[in-house]
Image (tube, grey):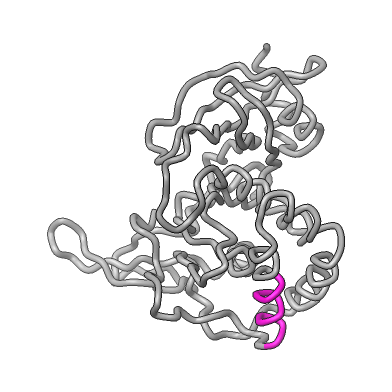
């Protein structure tokens, strides 16, 4: 494998990559030790094309009290299917396949741009960037006031809508990646699609505000797709009740026309938030 092969696909992260991620030979590069579940970075090679990917074997999933064992990898794939159907392509190509540690989710690796300004983070209270939305109060080790905040960015607004529909229970700032061409991606969707309200996110800046004009047509299209191909694709990884809950969340968003507000029955912001 040459570095040029990988770099060529980082320039256009989705062109031809899905085939390599789906069917390519996986060569382990190393484990991502900060991940809560077993997460391995690999090279996937098919027909002379090599791309980097993240492989999460089902066997390495940590049991959770509220999500059935062995279902996180399928939820990662369901999130990709929802992303594709939305037309926003917010989730890197993701498939369920066999690998060195057995079946698991395999997702295209997104190389973050070095010159991208962070969209979410902790900022001094007195230096909140213009247009940013404060989410929660914080302080540094010396007791100086900080804010958890995020930019007023259309890409983040789309991601917020996606997370509401997917019922994402863990949208940390570190799960938002800006790749080549300023494309925003969301990763780590193993704890999505529960039937109970579990939305936890750092993207509460638009809570209660009207949805952007581009969103209602997307929701209407998703509603139709959920009764067809998208519903069938999700059903391969989710229960019938979970797919029905996706339909219900789309319907609620369409009816309200507004971003939701924290409900109070579930922690609104994940920990750690970044």
Q: Which residues are magenta?
A: 247-255
Q: Nearer the viewer, residue 58 or 147?
A: 58
Quick check: can you spot residue 16?
yes
The answer to whether residue 251 is magenta is yes
Q: Is residue 197 left or right of residue 7?
A: left
Which residue is situated farthest in the left direction here? Answer: 142
> Where's residue 118, x and y in %?
48, 53
Quick check: can you spot residue 5?
no
Q: Quadrant of residue 172?
A: bottom left
Q: Which quarter of the rendering shows the N terminus?
A: top right
Figure check: 37 above or below 98: below
How many numbered marks, from 0 up?
0
Q: Residue at x 39, y 31 (%)?
A: 33
Figure check: 255 above or below 81: below
> Where's residue 140, x and y in %?
20, 59
Q: Is residue 179 left or right of residue 38?
A: right
Which residue is situated farthest in the bottom direction here? Answer: 256
Q: Nearer the viewer, residue 101 or 171?
A: 101
Q: Residue at x 51, y 54 (%)?
A: 191
> Where's residue 104, x and y in %?
60, 34
Q: Residue at x 51, y 51 (%)?
A: 68
Q: Quadrant of residue 18?
A: top right
The answer to whether residue 53 is magenta is no
Q: Nearer the viewer, residue 93 or 136?
A: 93
Which residue is situated farthest in the top direction here? Answer: 1
Figure check: 219 above or below 233: below
Q: Is residue 145 left or right of residue 97?
A: left
Please name the predominant secondary structure of the magenta segment in the image: helix
Q: Residue at x 70, y 18 (%)?
A: 25
Q: Quadrant of residue 122?
A: bottom left
Figure check: 1 above or below 226: above
> Where's residue 131, x and y in %?
49, 74
């Amino acid at each position: 494998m040459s570095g040029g092969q990988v770099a060529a696909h980082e320039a256009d992260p989705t062109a031809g990559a899905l085939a390599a991620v789906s069917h390519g030979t996986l060569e382990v590069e190393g484990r991502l030790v900060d991940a809560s579940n077993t997460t391995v970075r690999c090279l996937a090679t098919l027909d002379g094309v090599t791309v980097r990917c993240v492989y999460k074997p089902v066997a390495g999933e940590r049991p959770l009290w509220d999500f059935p064992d062995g279902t996180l990898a399928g939820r990662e794939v369901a999130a990709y299917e929802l992303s594709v159907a939305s037309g926003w392509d917010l989730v890197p190509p993701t498939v369920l396949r066999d690998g060195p540690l057995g079946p698991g989710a395999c997702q295209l690796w997104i190389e973050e741009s070095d010159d991208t300004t962070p969209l979410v983070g902790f900022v001094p209270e007195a230096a909140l960037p213009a247009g940013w939305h404060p989410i929660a109060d914080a302080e540094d080790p010396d007791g100086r006031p900080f804010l958890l905040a995020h930019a007023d960015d259309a890409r983040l607004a789309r991601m917020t809508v996606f997370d509401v529909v997917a019922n994402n229970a863990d949208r940390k700032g570190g799960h938002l990646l800006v790749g080549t061409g300023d494309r925003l991606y969301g990763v780590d969707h193993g704890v999505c699609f529960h039937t109970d309200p579990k939305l936890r996110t750092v993207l509460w800046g638009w809570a209660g505000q009207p949805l952007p004009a581009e969103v209602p047509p997307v929701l209407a299209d998703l509603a139709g797709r959920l009764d067809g191909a998208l519903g069938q694709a999700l059903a391969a990884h989710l229960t019938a009740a979970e797919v029905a809950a996706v339909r219900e969340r789309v319907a609620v968003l369409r009816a309200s026309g507004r971003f939701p507000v924290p409900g109070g029955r579930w922690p609104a912001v994940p920990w750690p938030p970044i």
